[in-house]
Amino acid sequence: LVVQANKLGAEIQPTLYGHFFEDINFGADGGLYAELIKNRSFEFPDKFAGWEIFGNVTLQDDGPFKRNPHYVRLGNPGHMHKHTGLENGGFFGIGLKANEKYRFTVWARGENQKISVELIDNASMGESQVITQQEVAINSKEWKKYEVILTSPVTFEKAHLRIFLTTPGTLDLEHVSLFPTDTWKGRENGLRKDLVQALVDTKPGVFRFPGGCIVEGTDLATRYNWKNSVGPVEDRPLNENRWHYSFPYRFFPDYFQTYGMGFYELFLLAEDMGAEPLPVVSCGLACQFQNDNPEAHVKVCDLGSYIQDALDLIEFANGSTDTRWGKLRADMGHPAPFNLKFIAVGNEQWGPEYPEHLKPFVEAIRKAYPDIHIIGSSGPNSEGDQFDYLWPEMKKLKVDLVDEHFYRPEDWFLKSGNRYDNYDRKGPKVFAGEYACHGKGKKWNHFEASLLEAAFLTGVERNADVVYMATYAPLLAHVEGWQWRPDLIWFDNLRSVRSCSWYVQSLYGHNKGTNVVPLTMDKQPVSGQEGQNGLFASAVWDEPTQTYIVKVTNVSDKTQKLNVEFKGLKKSVQLGEGTCTTLHSDNLDAENTLDNPNLIVPKESKISIENNVLNTEIGAKTFAVYKFVK
Ligand code: AHR
């Protein structure tokens, strides 16, 4: 390999690597969003879904929160040996950690009443052991929020919350909530700390949300409506999740979106991560392949409110506090703008309807916010490379970036290292917004997939003049609640595991550099197709740390000699000792699991270089990152 160390190529966008978050696989409710109670507002279609009730419990519908009007009334059970109460099993049980504190809150009204709030260790009523308990006195004629902190003395993966009336009267309960106090940054209505840490730890430069198919909805009525996801959390109306029944073999009838982690929380998360927020809005077309269904399309002439939603979203993110939506952002706790620069319109739309729908959005956004970068879509990721067919339309509409999605098998990734080598440099830039190597033969998140992703990403990096963003998908999956795999991070109620693909993302995120550096292999410019002798490579320069970074993936099954010459440096410049970080597994099918999370992790060692030439070997099936400070 020859690195032309005296020549700086294209600038690498700070957004090149990042995350795409969607509420799939219980990624939000039951996942990143740290709420532990399912159906906390009694608004699921089955109002008691997730709850067991006992004694005298009735459902009421004139509660204090207009958009979530249902609540429960606990009445006298009518006998001294009977109790009135209710029990919630969380999403897949409630995970408790020893000595951690849990904030129980409830809206209630009643006079001189008491409830016992208990965390119990048994799934069914009757034989349960109380793990921890507190009594809460309710004494308010009007609705009022009550809070109590419970400390768990033990770690328990599948606890339940039980509440029962201990006085002989009547009281009303609404929005029953339980969060660990130890959320990300200790925020109330907060996010699960280990999962946010896993996101932050890849150093993401961009954060796309909230989907994915959930932006579109199964039908338009169930599309993600960002305006319902902001404001007081108790009054954000429930929405059906696109993923609750779409894959019959992973049927989750109780999969809804509370919007508890809504757009405000998502913007805040992007800010915490240091990533550019990239919201996606509905373009008035519901989720794919429903051409014959009139419920799935808004006529172009009726798009007004959809376009307004997009404009209002920009105002919510960036508007001054004198504006309607900017004020709401300030009221929620963030007077400073979120500094939104990008907006995507539509997710993975297809057919002639999409450009027709996109056009008026582009016109309106350009007119009101000329500095905002607009992202269009290249179409769905069906077989046979059809997914590129909307590119010409995107060029005509002059969107700034085009979102491409590809979930493809190993051989596709192997052959596609040169995918971007000949992309038009004059048109829109590329956002590879959803991709992952899907192993054939039902292998998921196995090492080989991550190795091929690493190989493919050398081509992304070499083409950083045209590829501005790339995000793996999906991001999160609950081991008991997934609909789609592979995924970057898996979790259960207490633990999480970073897949080998996560380590690839992290190695790229941390070693992104600021400029591409020209590279040749065997005197030829590096082209990624199938690699050269099974080797894929890219080189970058990182200005702040004055470091050359060379990434090499050896997909072959032989150890190979590697000679990397840093050419063109002044004689007086001698690169010092550097580092080599490798990701490797002898077993291509091996994967990190919750029980064995560190099976495949990067290993760093020192490496010496002489006269600016590195003579080394790269092991078979290895991704390696070499770094030398100038
Ligand atoms: O990432 C899973 C799904 O794949 C997304 O929701 C959708 O955009 C794509 O089809």
Image: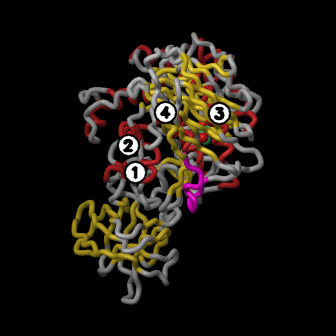
At x 32%, y 80%, the residue is 166
Q: Residue at point 67% right, 53% down?
A: 590
Q: Indicate the secondary structure of the residue bearing disc 3.
A: helix
Residue 339, which numbered label?
Answer: none
In terms of sequence position, does the residue under pointer 3 or pointer 4 come before the other? 3
Circle 4 — which element? Answer: loop
Quarter holding ligand 1: top right
Depth check: give the residue in front, 478 or 257.
478
Gap in angstroms between the C-alphas marked 2 and 3:
34 Å
Q: State the mark number for residue 511.
A: 4
Q: Please, which colouring scheme is shown? A: secondary structure
Tag 2: amino acid:
Glu
Image coords of residue 214 (percent x, y)? 55, 41
- Residue type of the residue flagged with mark 4: Asn
Mark 4 closeness class: few <14, some 14–19, many ≥20 residues within 10 Å: many
Say which residue label 2 marks.
265
Label 2 with label 3: CB-CB less than 8 Å? no
In the picture of the structure, the residue carrying the numbered disc 1 is 191
Q: Image quarter for residue 594?
A: bottom right
Kindly identify the amino acid type of the residue bearing the numbered disc 3.
Answer: Ala
Q: Is residue 53 above or below residue 416?
A: below
What are the residue bounds of the magenta stretch? 592-602
